[in-house]
Amino acid sequence: MRRERACLVGAQVRRRGNGWALADSVAELSALASAAGANPVTTVTQTLNAPSPTYVGSGKLDEIAETVRDFHVETVICDDELTPAQQRVLEDRLEVKVIDRTALILDIFAGRARTREGKLQVELAQVEYLMPRLAGQWSHLERLGGGIGTRGPGESQIETDRRLMRLKARDLRRSILDVRDQRGSQRRRRQRGEVKTVSLVGYTNAGKSALFNTLTGSDIRSVDRPFETLDTTTRRLYLPSGASATLSDTVGFINKLPPILIDAFNATLEEAMFADLLVHVTDISNPLAAESAEVVDSVLADLGLGETPRVLVLNKLDLVTDVPPPAEEISNDGNVMTSAIKRWGIDELRSAIDVALGNVSAVDEVDDAAATIAV
Ligand SMILES: Nc1nc2c(ncn2[C@@H]2O[C@H](COP(=O)(O)OP(=O)(O)OP(=O)(O)O)[C@@H](O)[C@H]2O)c(=O)[nH]1
Ligand SMILES: [Mg+2]
């Protein structure tokens, strides 16, 4: 497949943002662009004093126009969600297709969705994204050559008018509700059996699916690229106390996660929303582990899950050390260090889940603590 030549553009308003350095955010954008099949050939960034109606300042825009010509750029990808007006102005000035981070992420999601629920949710997000951007846009986009940001199930809808899209969105919501009802009744059956539910959550690519496979003996796809998992899988998890729980693996989060996606993926995220315990998986080898964990915390808070009991897992330990640390260092304050690949810390994680679910009584814990002190 020929890869569209893309110019990445990042802008940050001084004293705003969430602690991510502009360069780190754009580096992540580059990985997203590659995952969507683009070829990021060059990058332009700018720190601004105030937001600009053209995303970057006017001088910077001239620089980008020049870069577009010099590098034979076909698509400009901005690191934030653009307003419809910003997008139009940029396309008029640059005379190439301009897409934003949201369109890029939607494009990746469109390529990854496999189940009916996943596909419906991506389509809903695309319709919601396109609706305000519709007026006069399609002929304009077509002139600029289609491709990334214009693909997926939403594509056939673009030429229809907004009224049709609103009807479409309503139908999609209904279909999602149907699928979700089925899932809800499965969940209620499980709850009647009083099986506790545990959900893996975390930044995309942290190793949630790899851990899920190691913990449940499953074989779901775990690949080194963003948003590999979109659909929720649930399996039984056996715990050292003899109790069992269900474990769910689900879609990962990312910095600047489009609200449209959180909205559309409500059904998929429900498994986490009803969980008794969240296992927050972070990639400890990632230099941005702390920033990524903060993003996850804030998305969870937005979902109303700020108070759900949580175990923090620092995964990919094998990438920062050659030998596993002693058992007492593996788990600490309810945090557990793991390597899903080398199976380090897996028993400790099961124990931590057991304790957090209240399967292991406080007395046992005190005994354990006493035993540790005695040693
Ligand atoms: N070295 C090492 N690699 C790991 C570990 N856990 C996961 N990986 C790798 O990291 C990549 C991402 O793992 P996934 O399990 O797909 O991550 P995920 O959190 O499910 O990601 P999404 O589904 O995309 O949100 C894969 O290439 C895994 O093989 C680990 O403990 N050590
Ligand atoms: Mg996954």
Image: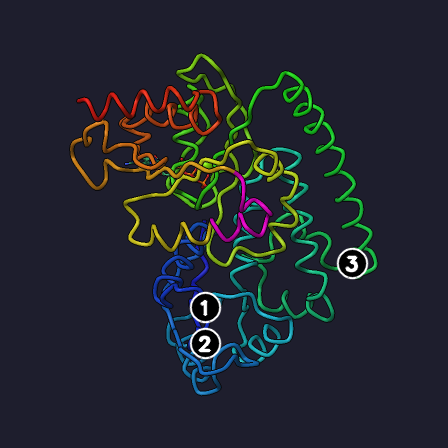
User: Mark 2: is the Cβ under 8 angstroms from ligand 1?
Assistant: no
Q: Nearer the viewer, mark 1 or mark 3?
A: 1
Give the residue pinned by disc 3.
160
C-alpha separation, residue under disc 2 versus residue under disc 1: 7 Å
The crowd level at tag 1 (other Cα within 10 Å; few <14, some 14-19, many 20+) is few
Give amino acid for label 1. Answer: Gly
Whether tag 2 and tag 1 are in contact, CB under 8 A, the answer is yes
Whether tag 3 and tag 2 are in contact, CB under 8 A, the answer is no
Q: Position of residue 263 (x, y in %)?
A: 65, 50
The crowd level at tag 3 (other Cα within 10 Å; few <14, some 14-19, many 20+) is few
Identify which residue is drawn at 72% across, 27% down. Answer: 182
Q: Which residue in the rendered view is the most extreme toward the bottom?
A: 59
Identify which residue is drawn at 80% across, 61% down. Answer: 161
Give the quarter of the figure containing the C terminus.
top left
Give the residue pinned by disc 1.
17
Q: In the image, 331: left or right of 252?
A: left
Give amino acid for label 3. Answer: Thr
Q: Which residues are magenta?
A: 297-308
